[in-house]
Every structure is written in C-alpha cells, then in structure tokens.
Image: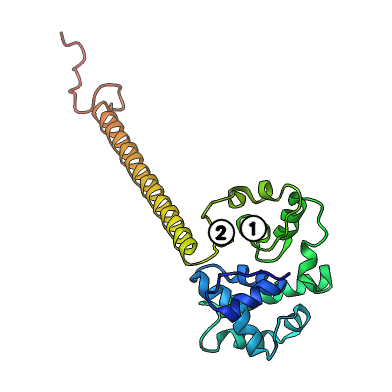
Amino acid sequence: MDATLHLAQQPDADALLGRSPLAALIGILLDQQVPMEWAFAGPYTLARRMGADDLDAHDIAAYAPEEFAALLSAKPAVHRYPGSMAKRIQQLCAFLVERYDGDAEAVWSNVTDGAELLARLKELPGFGAQKAQIFLALLGKRLGVRPEGWREAAGAYGEPDAFRSVADITGPKSLALVRAHKQEMKAAAKAEKGAGAATSTRTGKTAKATKTAGTAGTAGTAKGSNGSPKGAKKQAPGGS
C-alpha cells in the first residue's frame, strides 16, 4: 500500500497513513468526537512515542494497558478520550494478531468482492456499519483496493464525486466540502430531533386534557348509594 492521503494535513503523518495499513485502520478508529486532522495524526504520534517508523499490531497488543494508555495521554494527547481509545486500539490489534497474524492488509488483500470486504471490516473491534463503509470507500477511492461491488458495499460513501466522508478528501477544497456536508447532516438531525420532541409534548398535553375532561364529566354524574344523584332529597314514604 503506497498512496498519498490528505487526512492529517501533516505531510509525515499523511505519508504514514498512505503506506501503513495498520495506521490507516487506527486513524479511522480514532476518527470520532475529535476533529479529523487530530484523529488521523494520531497513528504518527503514537509511532513516534513507541520509537518506530511504523506501527506493529503484535507490539501494540502486547503492551501493558496502563503503559499504552499513558502513550496516548501524554501531551499533546492522541485523542480527547485517550484511555478508552487506547483500549480500543489494543482490542483491534489483538484481533488482527489472532485472526490475521497481525497483518492489517490481510483484512482486504484476498477478498472476492465488496460484500465480503464489508463483512470483514464490520468484524473489527470498534467498527460499526457506518465506520466500516467509510473505510471501505477510503480503500476504494484513495488506496486502490477495488474488489467487485465495492461501491455498492460502501453505500452512499462509495458514490463518485461525493463529499460525504474522509474517503472524499484530496485537499483543502474537498475537506471544506466534506465539513459543510457534515454540518448540514448535523443541522438536519437536530431539527428532526426538535420536531420529534415538540410532537411528543403536544401529544402529552392532548392526552392530559382529554383525561382531565373525562374525569370532570364522571364527577358531574356521580350518584349516591341509592342510585339517585348525590345531594338529592329522599322522598318520605307515602308522599304524593
């Protein structure tokens, strides 16, 4: 694997992502709840702190958890949540060691089609359906990994000339377009959530009003124990 990426916006960090399958996997794993550049610079920062030019799944999996977390926590931190992300990275590397003998590229090097590749990516710890599809699109669009049906397997992220994810970033201009798309998606989700909350509130008020009206009606027709309305005078025996 040897490609030019522009995700960390730092030449050395992007160079590592382009030549190291494990660095690319760890970069996409870190890409949540932090700016994209921060996430994808993480593998390079981690490699330097481990005193290496590349990352090795065996080495990372064998690290003492508290010591590995300290590598991510040292300033500047590799992630906003270094402790939890350190655990996820080690889980990913342990899986790669067990399933692929530590070779990250083996996840996609011998797949028969896009569906198989997507299934393999979804098996990786920390990779949900969306993250798997985004990474599949990155492989196809930027790293030359294009098994039959890869675009279909990647869903909307595989569409050509789209600006939906990191798979579509080739420089500052496309980065700005991807960011704009994400802001639109966030705004739409926020508006939908607000509309749902408003509908729920209106429904609750209507139900409460209906219940109150029903209670009032029942109280107005309450009867005494003799079957007559409460408060009605009893007629004396024999009266006309």
Q: Outermost residue, left direction? A: 240
Going from the N terminus, do you reach mark 2 or mark 1 first?
1
State the residue at coordinates (45%, 61%).
179
Q: Are marks 2 and 1 in contact (CB under 8 Å)?
A: yes
Q: Position of residue 192 (x, y in %)?
A: 40, 47
Q: Nearer the viewer, residue 167 or 75?
A: 167
State which quadrant residue 133 falls in: bottom right
According to the picture, the residue beneath numbered tag 1 turns out to be 141
State the residue at coordinates (70%, 51%).
150
Question: With respect to residue 102, does 215 lie above or below?
Answer: above
Question: With respect to residue 68, does 32 lie above or below?
Answer: above
State the residue at coordinates (80%, 72%).
103
**Residue type at the position of mark 1:** Lys
- Secondary structure at numbered mark 1: helix
State which quadrant residue 126 falls in: bottom right
- Relative to residue 178, is residue 233 drawn left or right? left
User: Badge 2, how many Cα within 10 Å: few under 14, some, many 20+?
Assistant: many
Q: Outermost residue, bottom direction? A: 51
| Mark 2–mark 1 distance (CA, rounded to whole Å) | 7 Å
Quadrant of the frame with the N terminus: bottom right
- Secondary structure at numbered mark 2: helix
Q: Nearer the viewer, residue 95 or 202?
A: 95
Quadrant of the frame with the C terminus: top left
- For the image, the number of numbered tags is 2
Q: Position of residue 63 (x, y in %)?
A: 72, 86
State the residue at coordinates (26%, 21%).
228
**Residue type at the position of mark 2:** Asp
- Tag shown at residue 168: 2
Q: Position of residue 20 (x, y in %)?
A: 71, 74
- Tag shown at residue 9: none
Q: Please, which colouring scheme is shown?
A: rainbow
Instruction: Examine the rendering and report whether any part of residue 88 can be seen.
Output: no
